[in-house]
């Protein structure tokens, strides 16, 4: 899986083709969508129209909350494949645990079956806390490849990232820039100025330096390119330490324990 992904959250289907085309032209090879984003069709069309071989593009989609459960998960995965018009998916995630519904274990078992059938290359989860991860691992003996969670300098998820690391689970970061709210942080501005890079690049380079796989989203071609160029930036240890000081537990998205 590539070390950085291109997210398409909130990009309408009519606009997603241009954004994904730009991302692929800049070097992105990891595209992150979801059924609830309503743009899988546009993502699939762009991938099929690209000169880049399908095997060189890593595509992630997700099972939405209303589609959890054995039969619904299978149908949802097949529907995503149909909308994307692809033979297989590189990674499918359970979008949220929604423990109140009590279906995420059945959903996980279904993803295991779909992987065994060859429709999915890898399976993982999104927004899972350690207790949710423990449950699916204990019930199935199958460890997720990925746990995609809200993670940025305000919400560094140190305990969760450590749990993921102990189990060999990759931590992916959604909203890696804190929905842009972190760009005005003085520490971020200082790090960016010291390296003659943008504030967004400084944050993305921080993610990469601590082993996260960030998934930035933009529809602006210049920003899409700048974000990808963060893969070439190496921060100094003192830069990383400075950014670590920003950890305050502030979320820009829902709490997984409360989201339904």
Image: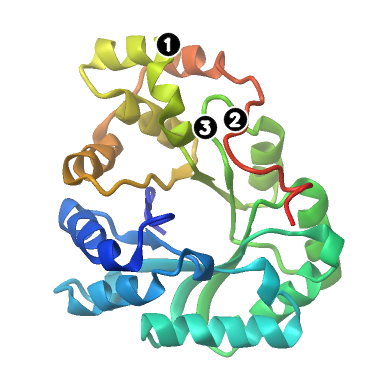
Q: Is residue 243 visible?
A: yes
Rate crowding at label 2 as few (under 14), some (14 to 19) or many (20 or more) other CA atoms within 10 Å.
many
Q: Residue at x 61, y 63 (%)?
A: 124
Picture quadrant where residue 28 is located = bottom left
Q: Residue at x 37, y 55 (%)?
A: 2
Q: Is residue 119 visible?
A: no
Q: Tag 2, which secondary structure?
A: loop
- Quadrant location, the C terminus: bottom right
Q: Name the residue tied to disc 1.
A: 187
- The location of residue 92, given as percent across then percent down, is 54, 70
Please tell me which residue lies in front, 35 or 15: 15
Q: Is residue 133 left or right of residue 93?
A: right
Disc on res. 152: 3
- Of the image marks 1 and 2, the number of the one nearer the N terminus: 2
Q: Is residue 93 left or right of residue 60?
A: right
Q: CA distance from mark 1 to mark 2?
A: 15 Å
Q: CA distance from mark 3 to mark 1?
A: 14 Å
Q: Tag 1, which secondary structure?
A: helix
Q: Is residue 85 above or below residue 5?
A: below
Q: Name the residue tied to disc 2.
A: 156
| Contact, mark 2 vs mark 3 (Cβ under 8 Å) | yes
Q: Residue at x 27, y 10 (%)?
A: 194
């Amino acid at each position: 899986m590539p070390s950085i992904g291109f997210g398409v959250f909130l990009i309408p289907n009519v606009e997603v083709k241009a954004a994904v085309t730009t991302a692929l032209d800049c070097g992105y090879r990891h595209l992150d969508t979801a059924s609830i984003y309503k743009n899988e069709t546009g993502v699939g069309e762009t991938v099929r129209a690209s000169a880049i071989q399908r095997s060189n593009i890593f595509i992630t989609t997700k099972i939405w909350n209303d589609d959890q459960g054995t039969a619904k998960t299978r149908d949802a995965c097949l529907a995503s494949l149909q909308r994307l018009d692809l033979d297989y998916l590189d990674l499918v995630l359970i979008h949220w645990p929604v423990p109140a519904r009590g279906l995420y274990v059945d959903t996980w078992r279904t993803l295991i079956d779909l992987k065994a059938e060859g429709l999915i290359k890898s399976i993982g989860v999104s927004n899972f806390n350690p207790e949710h991860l423990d449950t699916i691992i204990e019930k199935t003996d199958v460890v997720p490849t990925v746990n995609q969670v809200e993670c940025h300098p305000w919400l560094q998820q140190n305990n969760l990232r450590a749990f993921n690391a102990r189990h060999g689970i990759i931590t992916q970061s959604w909203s890696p820039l804190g929905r842009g709210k972190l760009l005005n942080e003085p520490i971020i501005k200082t790090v960016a100025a010291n390296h003659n890079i943008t504030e967004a690049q400084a944050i993305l380079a921080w993610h990469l330096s601590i082993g996260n796989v960030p998934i930035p989203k933009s529809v602006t071609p210049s920003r899409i390119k700048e974000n990808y160029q963060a893969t070439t930036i190496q921060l100094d240890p003192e830069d990383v330490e400075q950014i670590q000081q920003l950890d305050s537990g502030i979320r820009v998205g829902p709490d997984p324990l409360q989201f339904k």
